[in-house]
Amino acid sequence: MSSLPVLVLNSGSSSIKFSVYEAGDGARTRLFEGAVDGIGTDLGKFWIKDASGKKLVDETPALPTRAVAFKLVSDALHSGHFPVPAAIGHRMVCGGPTVLENQIITPALIDEMESYTAFAPLHTPIAVYIMRESLRLFPGVPNFVCLDSYFHRTMPEVVTHMPIPSEYATMGVRRFGAHGISYESIVHQLQPNVPEKLIVAHLGNGASISAIRNGKCLDTSMGLTPTGGIISGTRTGDIDPGVLLFILRKIAETAESATDAADQLEVVASKKAGLLGVSELSNDMRDLRDAIKEGNAKARLAVDKFVWTIQKWIGSFFVELGGLDMLVFTGGIGENDIVSRAEICAGLGALGIKNDSARNNVRGEATISAGDSAVTVRVIPPAEDLIIVNHVVRLLGN
């Protein structure tokens, strides 16, 4: 049996997740997984677990920069306790309008993707940094980029084209979507019985929803950047552009330059808004649920807006699909927040959705719809690393 260790690197705005899979001879066995969380803080976490779940590393280091964070990962992977990767797969939210396919990484490709940082400003900088470091630290090992936007490439032009002057559209401004690898993993797990009309809600600190017909993306809530769509932990979601113009003008009164004003607006829209902005408390749904129990009205409003926005998107996708066979919840909130799922389903009775409270009283994979529900409702954890490994193996074969 040939060995093919594949390293997966999945970077977020403040975290780096990684795993090592054995992918030789068709195998897909996870050997190790780990993460560094809390980049940019003094309250970082660094852990590694083996296939049985045993903690091999469990530390709380200061993580002031992404360089410090990735050095921890690199040093561990070079320690001799883990197999040397034969290939490396990197998650990337969006490579820009000229990078639409998963492919091998070169220095020129990294430069090209970096030129479109504005399309995913919270994620692209750390992703391209890790790609460059990976090429340097693992010489001779092929690296591949796996795009979230790849799954959304089947959306029709009426969905992707923005209602803006053509001069900006020709710059690549369009709907790209995000969380595509998560959605692809749900479709993969539903094989061979993928419903014709499927809606998947990826709900976490970043949240989005996709309408999927016969396993292919028809529409998705996020737009050019992950800031659009549903209200998220710290992001506005869709909002009247006039609101952003109003805020921009206020910022411009004291900003040092136009670039400075734009940067400050980006912080407001992407890091200070959403659940955090409405609640003035936290971007973590667990904190908000605790606060609601104590009678916190702002926390209640934030969660109500989250639920209401999701219901609106599901309703619009129901119409777009011409009905619905299955609704799937995934992501950290989707998998673990029993109350959020119940509240969302409670407002979808007009679509034939009925939640079973006993079935819903679980965390992790389950069918939570009532027996007489016209729509099957399921909870399925994503398997993003597995999908990245599959793409890496496919691209190696090519």
Image (cartoon, rainbow, N blue to C red):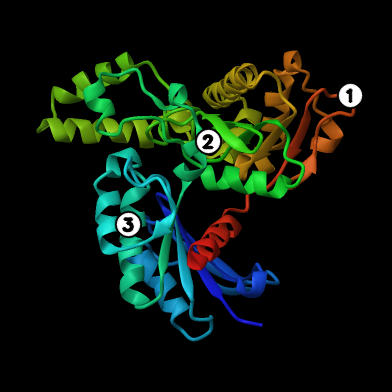
The residue under label 1 is 372
Pick whichever of labels 1 and 2 is earlier in the sequence: 2
Which residue of the protein is positioned furthest toward the bottom in this rendering?
Answer: 80
Across and down, in percent, residue 102 comes to 44, 53
191 sits to left or right of 268: right
Q: Secondary structure at mark 3?
A: helix
Residue 308 drawn at (x, y percent): 59, 20
Instruction: Please tell me which residue is depicted at 42% across the width and 62% down the height of the picture.
Output: 144
- For label 1, the crowd category at 10 Å Cα-Cα, with few meaning under 14, some 14 to 19 and many 20 or more, is few
Q: Position of residue 41 (x, y in %)?
A: 37, 55
Q: Pick the quarter of the image with the N terminus.
A: bottom right
Does the CB distance between marks 3 and 1 fall below 8 Å? Answer: no
Name the residue type under label 1: Asp
| Label 3 – label 1 distance at C-alpha | 49 Å
In the picture of the structure, the residue carrying the numbered disc 2 is: 207
Q: Earlier in the sequence, mark 3 or mark 2?
A: 3
What residue do we see at 21% from left, 20% from top? 250
Examine the image and state in which quarter residue 26 appears. Answer: bottom right
* Crowding at mark 3 (Cα within 10 Å: few <14, some 14-19, many 20+): many
- Count of numbered tags: 3
Q: Earlier in the sequence, mark 3 or mark 1?
A: 3
